[in-house]
Image: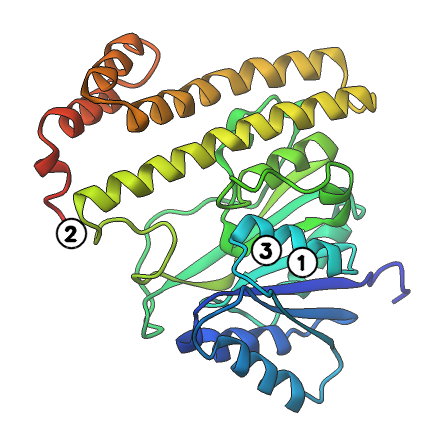
Amino acid sequence: MTEQDRPLVSFALLAYNQERFIREAVEGALAQTYSPLQVILSDDCSTDRTFEVMQQMALTYAGPHTIQLNRNERNLGLAYHINHVMQISEGQLIVVAAGDDFSLPQRVEALVKEWRKRNFSSGSIYSSAIIIDDLGRTIPTVGGKDSSCIRLSDRNSEIFSGVYGCSHAWTRDVATIFGAYDERILQEDLIIPLRSCLLGSICFISEPLVKYRIHRGTISRISYLSYRDRLMKMRRYWIARLAVFEQFERDVDHAAQLTMLSADDETWLRLAMSPHRYYAQCHVDFFRSTLLGKFRTIFGSLGRVPVIQSAKWLVIATAPWLYGARK
C-alpha cells in the first residue's frame, strides 16, 4: 500500500486530572494498529499524577509510533487545549481521545478505512461507542443508528446535532482553514462538525471503536450537583452553546469570502441555524436573568421553543427545589 493510502495520522490524547484512568487510555493509544501514527500525550496542567503516568509510559514505549509529550504550563480548558494540540499535531487526520476513555486497537485503522472510501475528503468522522462505568463495566444502551454520511448538499438539519465527541476525528484543514475556535466553547463536538459540513462531510461509523466512560467527573453529568451548582453549570453550558453559533456565523462569512459556498448554500445554512441560535440565546437570557427577566424569557419565547422547555423554565423559576431534588 502506497504512502498516499496510509497518510500520517495524529492521535491526540487530552487529559486533565485523570490519574485513575490515564494508564488504560494511554495503553489504548499505543496499541493502535495503524501506522504511521503520531501519538500526542497532552496534559492540561493536572494537579494529580496524570502527567507523570503519561511520561513514564512514553519513556518505556518501544513500538512503531512516534510519541510526543506535552504538558500545558497552566490549565487552559478544553477549547484552548484542542487549539494548542492542533498546533503541534502533524497528521492529515486528527483523532481525539479523552484521558478517561479507552480507544480500541482498530480505531484509527477503521477511521482511515472509512476516510479512504471517501477519497480522503475533508470533514469529520466519528463512530459508535461502548458505554462503561468507572469500573469498566458495560452499561447497556438502547438503540443506535446505521453508518451514514451527511453533506451540505443534503440540506439535512442533523448537522446541528453534533457528533459523539468521545469518538471524533477530523481532517486537518477543518482547523487550519478557519483557525482556532472561540475559547468560550466548552466542547468541540458541534463546532468542528459544523466546519466540516462547510468543507466536506460528517460521516458516522456504526462500529463501536471507543469505550466511553460515564462517571462523576464526566463533563456532561449534572444529576449529582446541587441546585445552585446545576444552574451555574447550565448557564456556562448555554453561554458556550451560543458561542458555537456565533463562531459558526463567522465561519460561514469566511467560507463565503473564500467562495466555498454557493448563495443557496449560504442562505440555507443561515436559515437552518437561526432557530438553534435563538434557542441558545433564550437559555442564556433565562439563566442570566432575575426572576422577572426569567418570566420575560418564558413568555416572550412562547410558540418559538418547545412547550416542555417553557414548562421546565417555569419550574426552575417558581419551584427551584423540584429542579434540584434529584441528585
Q: Nearer the viewer, residue 310 or 9?
A: 310
The residue at 48%/69% (across/down) is 46
Q: Which numbered disc flags the more N-terminal residue, 3 or 2?
A: 3
Are dots 3 and 2 in contact, CB under 8 Å?
Answer: no
Q: Is residue 187 toward the left or the right of residue 300 in the image?
A: right
As shown in the figure, which amino acid type bears the numbered disc 2? Lys
Q: Is residue 153 toward the left or the right of residue 18 in the image?
A: right
**Residue on which disc 1 sits:** 85
Q: Residues within 10 Å of mark 1 (few under 14, many from 20)?
A: many
The residue at 67%/37% (across/down) is 196
The residue at 65%/44% (across/down) is 124
SS at badge 1: helix
Task: Report the Cα–Cα distance between label 3 and label 2.
Answer: 30 Å
**Residue on which disc 2 sits:** 327
Task: Report the Cα–Cα distance between label 3 and label 1.
Answer: 6 Å
Q: Nearer the viewer, residue 261 or 104?
A: 261
